[in-house]
Each structure stands twice: as structure tokens, then as C-alpha cells.
Amino acid sequence: MKAFTYDRATSAAEAASAVAKTTGSKFIAGGTNLLDLMKLQIETPSHLIDINDLGLDQIEPATNGGLRIGALVRNTDLAANEYVRRDYAVLSRALLAGASGQLRNQATTAGNLLQRTRCPYFYDTNMPCNKREPGRGCSALGGYSRMHAIVGISDACIATHPSDMAVAMRLLDATVETVRSNGLTRTIPIVELHRLPGNTPNIEHTLEPGELITAVLLPKPSGGTHIYRKVRDRASYAFALVSVAAIIQPDGSGKVALGGVAHKPWRVESAERKLQRGSKAVTKELLANARTTHDNAFKVQLVERTLASVLNDAKG
Amino acid sequence: MTEFNPSRRKFIQNTAVTSGALIAAKLVPEVEAKSVLQPAQATTEPANVNVLLKVNGSEHQMMIDPRTSLLDALRERLHLTGTKKGCDQGQCGACTVIVDGRRITSCLTLAVMQEGHDITTIEGLGTPTNLHPMQAAFIKHDGYQCGFCTPGQICSAVAMLEEVKAGMPSHVTADLTRPSEMTIIEFRERMSGNICRCGAYSNIQEAIAEVAGVRT
Ligand SMILES: Cc1cc2nc3c(=O)[nH]c(=O)nc-3n(C[C@H](O)[C@H](O)[C@H](O)COP(=O)(O)OP(=O)(O)OC[C@H]3O[C@@H](n4cnc5c(N)ncnc54)[C@H](O)[C@@H]3O)c2cc1C
Ligand code: SF4
Ligand code: FES
Ligand code: FES
């Protein structure tokens, strides 16, 4: 690990301006992703600002009839929250399908959203990777790519976003509340938070330097049956090959988002209008323009079958 | 608050140990590995920091490199070697300790971040002459083979049962609107963050079930 200095932030605005002012500095929340990457020198911050004392760990009813989730709420507490369990069950389910009990006790809402890809070549510093070293090439293209993305990819990168929680947040149309280095706040719809790789897979989100996530806002509950189905190589404690988050209403209409297939949670609103026609029609539109490799071509069929099973379960 | 103390010994960058280095390099404790390297490049390195850790009920003041994980601080500085380093990447659970009543992987948190928190390691749960019920149950049911994963399994299991008691749901909880239940299926899912290379899982499960008062 490269050496760094460490400080604890006492206010959100100060933390944001401190990170923007000092090149090489980063926020640390749970640390479960950042420290892992620092040990491998994939992340090499020279200064860490610990944001755990900011008091952003509350879940409270929001004025819009929804819920305001502090950025530092632990994944365990979010999944166990009574409102979330009752009104946003897909979010509880997604969180509980991720990582392990120990990790969920440390991991935070904002850190989970901003966790980086688990592409094995991104982790292997001996291999070229455009996300780690722009311009070096992508080892996954032409390499082992079973876990990789099939939609929204580019010739520069085919990595997936590994978060389960983010898929549920995208399904729920969450918005992210931030404070910028100039002290001003703004909200970002979650669809605009994560980027597709394009020619700059090293830039993963739309936050400005130093911009601190303070909360995630959920809109009013929408009712319906909430399902999160994660298909993975082990029954527990493994990243998704494919995951389906869905909210289905009694008349068969609803919404659906996918994990494990793209550089961001994947949702195509026009495809949702076909939900009453079944999984084939929806998948065709969700994965239109899919570009698969020899290793991950199976994901297309896996999405369709997982969605079919989810829609079947939703019928009760 | 943590204080910076620039007068203390400085560490040099650990650039020699890359991810491609032999596994053996990983076995050398971070702190010692650094101290045997040339100190000449040390000039721009940040200083050690003063940290007060509360472990198993007693307080320990120490100067440490901010890079030190909680795991390395426990093992290398406090010589509480019950807590094990398996993967150092959050993947195996061997380093599980209990902080403020909650189980966490001590390899993925910094010691400086844990100031002011109550840390319990396997040494704090029980002693050879005064075993914690979970330790006694692991012995009774042979819940290990080599024993490397065992301290992590036991710390994890103790905190896990508290999570179920508190009504926290898991991936296998059928109805999220109701409190979760003490069942073997729940225990298995909730213990998935603790890997046992020897495959002692069935005996571990029996030990946990006995402590929980659940019949297998
Ligand atoms: C073995 C293992 C298995 C896992 N399995 C899964 C899984 O199955 N599913 C899944 O979804 N996840 C999984 N994870 C990932 C885990 O969910 C993330 O590591 C965790 O959510 C990150 O949260 P954190 O608070 O620890 O983030 P940190 O590591 O503290 O931070 C991550 C990034 O976010 C930035 N950041 C943090 N907070 C803020 C903020 N408020 N504002 C702006 N920037 C911020 C940091 O600077 C850093 O760049 C796994 C992790 C491990 C180690
Ligand atoms: S897929 Fe993306 S992260 Fe993986 S090697 Fe290619 S550029 Fe790097
Ligand atoms: S050593 Fe911490 S999880 Fe493996
Ligand atoms: S007893 Fe050997 S790893 Fe579990």
C-alpha cells in the first residue's frame, strides 16, 4: 500500500472542499472496497478523509412521502429497516443477496454505489486494463470474460458494475443527494450517476472531484410484488452472473432492472411496457444490441429464463 | 481525534511487494517488512499516528503507520494472534472480530478508523479455563480441523446469533415483514462469509445449533 495521511472530517462541506483542494485525496467510508484496491495499489490516494463521523447514518421519512437514506447507513441497517422491508422490499432483498454478514456491517450506502468493478484483469496489475491505465488495452476482450457485460459495452471495456443494491436503487428511481466542493448541494437521478464505459472506462460516475454523497432519496412506495433474483456460481457470497430486480403490479405491469450485464444497473423503460407479454418480449428489447463474447453469450438466455421465473413468482 | 506526530519514525513506500510477488512476501508482517527496507527514500513519507484502541476491555495507546489494518494492529502490535490473516481481501472471514457488537472483517478496516470503538477478539470471548459457550461447543462438536478459520468462525457465529435475535433478516428469510427465525438454513446463509478450507462445515453447524438451542 502507498503511504497516505489520514484525517477525520467533521462536516460534509469541509470534507468536500478538502478532497477537491488536495490532489490525491479520497473519502473513506466502510473501506471494504477502497482498502482492498489500495493494498493492490490500484487505488493510490495520498490522503484519506474518513467520513464516518459526519452523522449521515439516519434513515428517515422524506417530505416527498418517500425515504431519505443517509450515505453512511450500513448495508445491514438499510436491509433491516422496517420501512424498507415493508415498502421497498426489493432493496432489502438486493442488499441481503450481496457480500457477507461481516461486509454488510461495514459497507455503506454511498460506498456500495461507488464500488469498482470486479473484472479480474482490473485486479491483476500485471495485465493491461483501460480502466486502470487508460490506453493500455482491455485484457478481457479476447480473454476470460464469463463475468463480463453484454450491453452498453465499448471496445475499450466490457466490465460490469458489481453492486446488487444499485440495481434495486435504479429500479426504485432513487436520487442521489450530494454536496459539492463549493458547499452547494444538488440531486442526481441514479440513472445519471453511473456512466457507460465508452472511450473513458476509467471515469465511472458523474460526480465532480470532491463531491460527497450525503444521502439517497427514494420516491413514494409504489406497492406491487418486489423480487430480487440473483444467479451466481455459489448459493451465497458470490457476485452476480445475472440478477433481476422487479416490481410487478397485480395486473402484470411493472418495472424491471438487471445486474451483471452492464457497466451500470441496466434498465430500459420501453421494454417494461411489454411485461404483460412475457419474458421473451421484454428480454428482446432489454438486451437489444447485446454484444456477447464466446464466454458470456449464455447471459442472454440466462436473463430471459431468470425473468420468466421472476414473473412466474410474481403471480404468487 | 487522531494526532499526527511528524517526529516519529517514517516508513518507506512498500513498492517492492507487488501483487505479482511470491505469496511468501505476504506472510511477512507489513510493518516489519517495511522496516527492513532502505530508509533512504523516506523523506516525503507521512508520519505515524497516535491511536488508542480499546480491545477486549483494555485500552492500548500506540504509534502506527496509518496504513496498518485493524488486523495487523491486533496481531503485530498487540500480539493477539488468535485473529487470523487468511486472504487479507475480505473474502475468507478468518479475520472476523466484533466491533461494538457487530462482526466485521478486520483486514478491510484501518486501525485508525477504529479509535473509540469496542473491539472484541477471540481472546476476549473466553479463555482456556473459562470458555465462551460457542468455544466449548466448537470443541465438543469438533468444529474444525486445522483450526485456522476457527477464531473467525466463532466470533462470527457469536455475533450472528445476536443478529437473528435482533430480528435482522437474511437472504433466506422468507417473509421480510416478520422477525427472522433460529433455523439451520438461516445459520448456513448467515455464516457464508466464513470459509473453512478443511470443510468442517457440518460440525460448525452443529456447534452453532447447540448454542442457539436448535435441534439439527
Ligand atoms: C469479498 C467481497 C464480496 C463482495 N460481494 C458483493 C456482492 O455480492 N454484491 C455487492 O453488491 N457487493 C459486494 N461486495 C462489495 C461491497 O458491497 C462494497 O465493497 C461496499 O459496498 C463498499 O462500501 P464501503 O462503504 O466499504 O466503501 P469504501 O470502500 O469506503 O468506498 C468505496 C468508494 O466510494 C467512495 N465513497 C464512499 N463514500 C462516499 C461518499 N459519501 N461520497 C462520495 N464518495 C464516497 C470512496 O472514496 C471509494 O472510492 C463485496 C466485497 C467483498 C470484499
Ligand atoms: S473489461 Fe474493463 S476493467 Fe476489465 S480489463 Fe477490460 S478495460 Fe479493464
Ligand atoms: S483475512 Fe480478512 S477476510 Fe480473509
Ligand atoms: S478448520 Fe481448517 S480452515 Fe477451517
Image: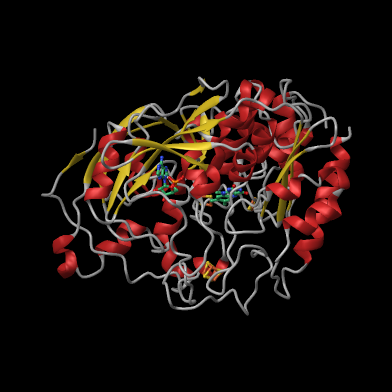
Q: Position of residue A114 (x, y in %)?
A: 48, 49
Q: Position of residue A6 (x, y in %)?
A: 26, 45
Q: Position of residue B166 (x, y in %)?
A: 62, 21
In percent of the image, x 63 and y 26: which residue is there? A84
Q: Residue furthest left?
A: B7
In percent of the image, x 50 and y 40: which residue is there? A107
A214 vs B171, left or right, is left
Q: Quadrant of the N terminus of chain A?
A: bottom left
Q: In this view of the protein, can residue A121 be seen by the observer?
A: yes
In percent of the image, x 78 and y 34: which residue is there? B184
Q: Position of residue B118 (x, y in %)?
A: 41, 28
B31 vs A158, left or right, is left
A296 vs A110, left or right, is right
Q: In this view of the protein, can residue B199 be seen by the observer?
A: no
Camera-nearest residue between A230 and B59: A230
Instruction: Tally the marks.
Output: 0
Q: Is residue A128 above or below residue A216?
A: below
Q: Is residue A184 above or below residue B88?
A: above
In percent of the image, x 66 and y 22: which residue is there? B167
- The scheme the figure's colours follow is secondary structure
Q: Quadrant of the C terminus of chain A?
A: top right
